[in-house]
Image: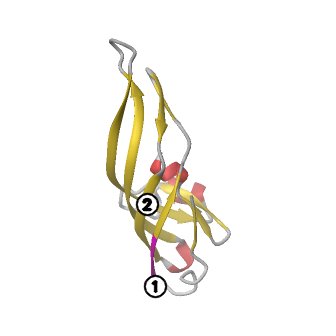
Amino acid sequence: MRIDVSEILREAGLSLPFDVKGTVGDIALSDGDAELSMLTVRGVATSLGQSGVYIEVNVRGSVTLTCSRCLTSFERPIDLSCEGKFTGDVLQNRDGADDDDDVEVFPLEGTFCDLDEMIR
């Protein structure tokens, strides 16, 4: 899932609400894989000026898991919130020199934020 943030990148403080549906692929777990259904992602992207974009999202959908006792598949609903900072200079921001918070940093791909890794 990619969000085009080109219209807010120029000025810090500008926000862009979004509501998208899509998939992010399967999740590898230590005791097996989890299969995600179609997800609904609602959120807001806020420009941080030259340092990137801050995104907050709410994710709803379901995940198919396998019971470790009986090996039967079952579906579990997902309703979670997550946040991330998208920047062109990921390595500098991951060092923590600029940030006092614990927000995970992801690459800003031109004018697009790819939400898949943040949601996984």
Residue at the extreme top: 69
Q: Dots 1 and 2: beta carbons under 8 Å?
A: no
Q: Earlier in the sequence, mark 1 or mark 2?
A: 1
Residue 14 falls within the magenta-colored stretch = yes
- Report the amino acid beneath label 1: Leu
Q: Nearer the viewer, residue 93 or 5?
A: 5
Q: Residue at x 48, y 77 (%)?
A: 48
Q: Which residues are magenta?
A: 13-18
Q: Is residue 107 magenta?
A: no
Question: Residue 113, image x and y in percent?
Answer: 57, 64
Mark 1 or mark 2, whichever is nearer to me: 2
Q: Which residue is mark 1?
A: 14
Helix, strand or loop at disc 1? loop
Determine which residue is flagged by label 2: 41
> Which of the 4 image quadrants contains residue 109?
bottom right
Q: Residue at x 53, y 64 (%)?
A: 86
